[in-house]
Amino acid sequence: MAKKTVQDVDVQGKRVLVRVDFNVPLNEQGQVADDKRITAAMPTIRYLLDNKAKVILCSHLGRPKGQRNMDFSLAPVAKRLGELLPEVKITFADDCIGPDAMDKAMALKDGEILLLENLRFHPEEEKNDPAFAHELASLAELYVSDAFGTVHRAHASTAGVAAYLPAVAGFLIGKELGFMGNALENPERPFVAILGGAKVSDKIGVIKNLLSKCDSLIIGGGMAYTFFKAQGYGIGTSLLDADSIELAKDLMADAKQRGVKLLLPVDTVVGKAFEADTEYKTVPSDAIPDGWMGLDIGEKTCAIFADEIKKARTVIWNGPMGVFEFPNFAKGTAAVAEACAECEGTTIIGGGDSASAVKKLGYASKMSHISTGGGASLEFLEGKVLPGVAALNDK
Ligand code: AMP
């Protein structure tokens, strides 16, 4: 069911607790090294400020493991936020609950921001402790969820607080669910899903769910070798998910029965060792020599995959086609990224490695949507209920 959004409620004059994903990388000087996650939350923050709300932002940063550890303080984020919003008064509370946070929340005027210190300084956050969630909720009159990267976790700030406050989605969550939900429920066809990455077992749920929805399923990356093994090919020293061989057979049979075109690499770039400068060559997928490992898809495969992608009206891509961290084995991932950039349909890039590859190659602006949450987008594509979304009020 559709969830209420920040536009469905009156925010004027209200203290609004916004769960954002400000889990940003910090450099050695402790400054924000990349502010993309901060700018991703800006549409919601600006909307609330423009509509005269009192904005209370909360987030986690890194893994302080329930301890107060200043290496993971959000103070540098407050500084960056101030640079992005020079006209706005921003205060910082050095804890996310307690008297200081409460006093500063109560002192907020319309159009001002209070940023709370790292939620994960309290072990109760990740345990979704009701008393902690209640204390956090007591700072505000309305809860807005806009941290897509953490909606697959039932934490106090992502799900627990919704028991105590009206709870609605922000613009980032709305955009994520809009793009991916539409692709799953009502895709323009042909709908091509591309899956890569290391292990089949990590993506079984996604493969199964997408097989029931897409017209073509492209499989590359380390997981392809388990499918080769399932067909009886020798795979040398390539990555093998031995426990998933039978499952790969079932998935191939399922694709056939459903009439889904399953595209596996026809050729493979093999190397002698898992090293950036290892000797390499391209071989047909059914002729991987003993002692060699598959590290990328080959040129013929790049052309076949690119052709399929360019014809699509909807594309979802998650996971690299090879060991793209090594330039010699990044060509397959680059070819898929380029084909997605050239595709005129809707192109949706799951978070994580495929998103970084697309950005690094300079294709980000050519995609319809790049998800901000790797884990969350995978769980959504699996068809799982996301606790942080389920907790929001229905329309
Ligand atoms: P995942 O987190 O499952 O999406 O996997 C991403 C990782 O898969 C990246 O670090 C890639 O280097 C790795 N990967 C992709 N292709 C291969 C391959 N052929 N052999 C080993 N690792 C691979």
Image (tube, grey):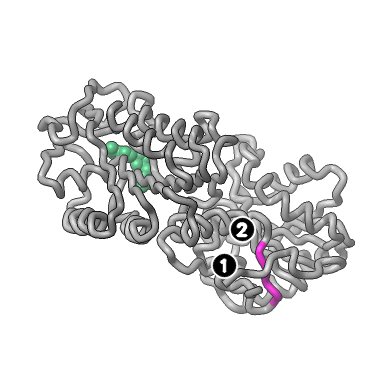
Image quadrant in which you'd find residue 317 = top left
* Residue ID at (58%, 42%): 25
Report crowding for label 2: few under 14, some 14 to 19, many 20 or more residues within 10 A (C-alpha). Answer: many
Quadrant showing the C terminus: bottom right
Question: Does any portion of residue 21 appear in the rendered image?
Answer: yes
Residue stretch in magenta: 165-169
Q: Position of residue 217 (x, y in %)?
A: 33, 48
The tag on residue 353 is: none
User: Closest to the observer: 357 or 130?
Assistant: 357
Q: Which residue is mark 2?
A: 173
| Residue plotted at (74% across, 71% down) | 142
Image quadrant where residue 1 sits:
bottom right
| 5 sits to left or right of 287 | right
Q: Secondary structure at mark 1?
A: helix
Q: Tell me the residue at 61%/58% (across/down).
A: 173
What amino acid is labelled 1 in the image?
A: Val
The numbered dot on residue 389 is 1
Looking at the image, do the residues carrying marks 1 and 2 touch, with CB atoms under 8 Å apart?
Answer: yes
**Residue 266 point in image, percent of width and height:** 23, 35
Question: Is the shortest distance between ligand 1 and the CB of mark 2 under 8 Å?
Answer: no
Ligand 1's quadrant is top left
Q: Determine the residue positioned at 15% across, 46% down.
A: 229
Distance between the Cα atoms at labels 1 and 2? 9 Å
Q: Is residue 139 visible?
A: no
Which residue occupies the foreground of this view, 121 or 318? 318
